[in-house]
């Protein structure tokens, strides 16, 4: 474990104090850029391969009105956009990481991963993407780690790919982009996937996608489907289903990770507990939502650069439960790094969020 460089911290603290005292933009910028010596591991960093972007592009040319398909209908196609280039180009990503002092990205196949395809196509793409990801990680083991994809559409095959991804490819965990064909992971058909993650001792990152068909209608207006509201509505609902369903009684060591400061679930946690206790026979889970969260769930900061929200999450969930993420390339690296460099936190909490929790949860060797 890397010792904290106390002089660098004191220096950064001094700049922060100066910024607070003068209130000038220049001083604030200096604080944001203060070179605190600390490992920085970003944990929800999107990536793709040409075959995956091309396969999603084909689906956008159909008349399927699924909300994710509408989200992917970009002028000129996904691969032609700057977004496509940033998903595909590892050298560009590394150069930006070097410029900003980001030590590591934990890569994951961009949403909605392989979950728009039929089972065979999805499983084939997941295998291909996992192989390519493992090559990138092997070539840059201190700069990249990776979350494996699998196709929940075929749970038995998914379990085989999960085992291969950890035991053979040495990847660090798994990603599932919320619902699969409008079903959620608490459904018994998916239990083998949860059982495998628990047995392999690797977390499942439940990443957003647009709301499922059953809740889609009100999200079709005002671009509500995406990051402004729909992603957290979908993914927060998924997390609440998992927490209330009792699957964490069945798989007590299973760990899940959700981004975006917990997809708003932490802010509702007191009320969720309150009604869990007022209706004790309504919920299969033997544990209250807050008990499940503090035992089986981690959250990341992806896309939420807001000091009060981060401090609240640390207070309510505990400092071991919060990890840093950028959400690159959907968010830019520089503001996310500046936020974590300068946000008002106890320094041991900054180290926990910036790297220590990621090292533990994703089995990344301490530098
Ligand atoms: Mn993301």
Image: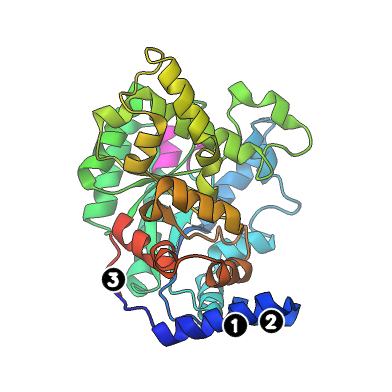
Residue range corresponding to the magenta coloring: 114-123
Closer to the eye: label 3 or 2: 2
Q: Find out whether the residues at labels 1 and 2 contact each other: C-beta distance under 8 Å.
A: yes
Q: Write down the residue under mark 3.
A: 366
Residue 63 place in picture, x, y as percent: 70, 31
Residue 244: which quarter of the image? top left
Q: Find out whether the residues at labels 3 and 2 contact each other: C-beta distance under 8 Å.
A: no
- Give above or below for 130 relative to 255: below
Specify whether residue 351 is in view.
Answer: yes
Earlier-in-chain disc, 1 versus 3: 1
Q: Say whether mark 1 is within 8 Å of ligand 1.
A: no
Quarter placement of the C terminus: bottom left
Q: Which residue occupies the extreme right position in the image?
A: 222
Residue 212 place in picture, x, y as percent: 58, 28
Tell me how far mark 1 sits from mark 2, CA to CA. 7 Å
Per the image, label 3 sits on a secondary structure element best described as: loop
Specify whether residue 208 is in view.
Answer: no
Q: Write down the residue under mark 2.
A: 27
Colour scheme employed for the rendering of this structure: rainbow
Q: Which residue occupies 54% across, 57% down?
A: 50
Closer to the eye: label 1 or 3: 1
- Give above or below for 75 relative to 115: below
Mark identifier at residue 316: none
- Give above or below for 12 relative to 50: below
Q: Which residue occupies 23% across, 56% down?
A: 168
């Amino acid at each position: 474990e890397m010792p904290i460089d106390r002089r660098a911290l004191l220096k950064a603290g001094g700049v922060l104090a100066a910024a607070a005292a003068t209130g000038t933009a220049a001083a604030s910028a200096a604080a944001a850029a203060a070179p605190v010596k600390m490992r920085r591991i970003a944990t929800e960093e999107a990536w793709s391969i040409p075959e995956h972007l091309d396969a999603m592009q084909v689906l956008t040319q159909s008349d399927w009105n699924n909300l994710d398909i509408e989200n992917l209908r970009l002028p000129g196609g996904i691969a032609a956009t700057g977004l496509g280039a940033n998903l595909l180009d590892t050298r560009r990503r590394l150069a930006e990481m070097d410029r900003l002092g980001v030590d590591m990205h934990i890569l994951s196949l961009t949403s909605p991963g392989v979950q728009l395809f039929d089972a065979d196509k999805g499983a084939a793409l997941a295998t291909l993407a996992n192989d390519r990801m493992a090559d990138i990680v092997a070539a840059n083991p201190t700069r990249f780690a990776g979350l494996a994809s699998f196709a929940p559409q075929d749970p038995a095959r998914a379990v085989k790919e999960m085992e291969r991804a950890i035991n053979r490819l040495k990847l660090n965990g798994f990603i599932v982009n919320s619902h699969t064909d409008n079903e959620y992971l608490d459904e018994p058909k998916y239990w083998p996937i949860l059982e495998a993650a628990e047995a392999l001792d690797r977390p499942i990152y439940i990443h957003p996608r647009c709301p499922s068909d059953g809740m889609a209608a009100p999200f079709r207006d005002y671009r509500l489907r995406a990051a402004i509201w729909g992603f957290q509505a979908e993914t927060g609902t998924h997390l609440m289903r998992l927490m209330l369903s009792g699957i964490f009684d069945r798989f007590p060591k299973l760990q899940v990770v959700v981004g975006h400061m917990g997809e708003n679930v932490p802010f509702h946690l007191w009320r969720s507990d309150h009604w869990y206790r007022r209706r004790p026979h309504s919920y299969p889970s033997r544990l209250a939502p807050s008990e499940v969260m503090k035992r089986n769930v981690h959250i990341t900061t992806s896309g939420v650069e807001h000091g009060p929200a981060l401090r609240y999450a640390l207070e309510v969930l505990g400092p071991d439960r919060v990890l840093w993420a950028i959400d690159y390339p959907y968010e830019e690296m520089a503001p996310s790094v500046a936020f974590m460099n300068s946000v008002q936190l106890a320094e041991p909490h900054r180290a926990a969020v910036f790297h220590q929790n990621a090292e533990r949860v994703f089995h990344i060797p301490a530098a």
